[in-house]
Image (cartoon, rainbow, N blue to C red):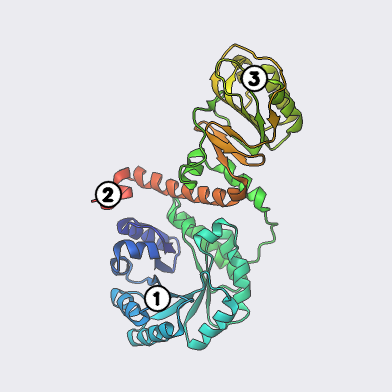
Amino acid sequence: MALDILELDRSIQIAKEAVLGGADWIEAGTPLIKSVGMDAVREMKKALPGVRILADMKTVDTGAMEVEMAAKAGADIVALLASSDNSTIEDALRAARKYGVQIMMDLLTVPDPVKRSRELEALGVDYICVHVGIDQQMTGRDTVDFLKEIVKVVNIPVAAAGGIDAVTGADAVANGAAIVIVGGSIVRSAQVTASAQKIREAIDHARISAAPKMSREEEMIAIFREVSGPNISDAMHRKGAMRGILPINLGIKIVGKAVTVQTFPGDWAKPVESIDMAGPGDVLVIYNGSNSISPWGGLATLSCKMRGVEGAVIDGAVRDVDEIRALKYPIWASGITPNAGDPKGMGEINSEITCGGQTVKPGDYIVADENGVVVIPKERAYEIARRAKEVEKMESRLYEEIRRGSTLSQVANLKKWEKA
């Protein structure tokens, strides 16, 4: 289990729970080592003396020095980057033999991993790690596909790392992995021991999954339905959230592609015409620009519902709120008014618009819940969905630690990270 978090005390607690669930090795991850130095290894070894400790140094230079440092702190295995020069690896291997530790080479971002794996085996390293990094995972690169390339060309043990859970862990072992390195699926779980047990059980009875894979879009939509608007906002570094647009009906969430409408105060022709162009999986996103004259009411809402349109987001006022609520249809708006406008027909459908202060293009993804509305550019939608899921996992773990008696400031270790 890989501990890629910043706080040592939290890491030790999570590691103990993971070992109870069946983890054989504990990895002091690079972020943890950068945060607290060799104490990450030293204290982990003290807390878990019978467990093998992997120090993920990601060394690219001074190989012998860093191996010696990790070994003296208590590491059993030291990870270097496979992109290191051979001279660095050779010196690291000399130090490893001297201090009785093993060397794992991480293929992260190596241009020709097959060729490099053969070279590394010839140099005498102990393990090769097929690693799809967190940022690469967010774009959809698959660890098991990468693994299949490498196990064919080397005879030393191969580890699989990057987005591993019970399903992919079992798939990795079935496809030749000797080691699976699991991070977020355990570390960010509210129930670490149970999550570790689930993965342990899966890899101990590994077989290649026969279940068909979801398409990227299916996976993305499923994630957007699971995570919250705040999770997505965090994943986008506080970008994408519309201002001043709130739900008319509470307890409803929508996910879909934007059909955009540019109109003028009170002109309801284009908003109503856009209903005929939309269908299941679409969200109408309308700029009207007035909170005193409405382009939308109960009849438009019923029309939308009958066509199966996912919902509507309106930068402007709506009316007939009692009817909209009775229909339980998802509408977000910036205001409420009894005043209706007129169908003048000005504006256009499916052009780039600004709604709630956010640029929205046709086909961008819209996620709206009780927190408000978030716009996700279609070009980055899959990546943002994956990042939002990681945010959700981390929050799940923090909730559990707070329930156990920590405060938020203690869990986040705010005092350590305040600017001096």
Secondary structure beneath disc 2? loop
Viewer-closest of 338 and 301: 338
Specify the label residue 267 is tagged with. Answer: none
Q: Is residue 163 visible?
A: no
Task: State the image coordinates of residue 342 (x, y, percent, origin top left).
Answer: 68, 15
* Amino acid identity at mark 1: Val
Q: Nearer the viewer, mark 1 or mark 3?
A: 3
**Mark 2 — residue?**
418
Q: Is residue 292 visible?
A: yes
Which quadrant of the figure has residue 301?
top right
**Mark 3 — residue?**
295
Secondary structure beneath disc 1? strand
Q: Nearer the viewer, mark 1 or mark 2?
A: 2
Quadrant of image for the N terminus: bottom left
Disc 1 crowd rating (10 Å Cα; few below 14, some 14-19, many 20+) is: many
Specify the label residue 78 is tagged with. Answer: 1
Question: Which of the two discs, 2 and 3, labels the residue nearer the N terminus?
Answer: 3
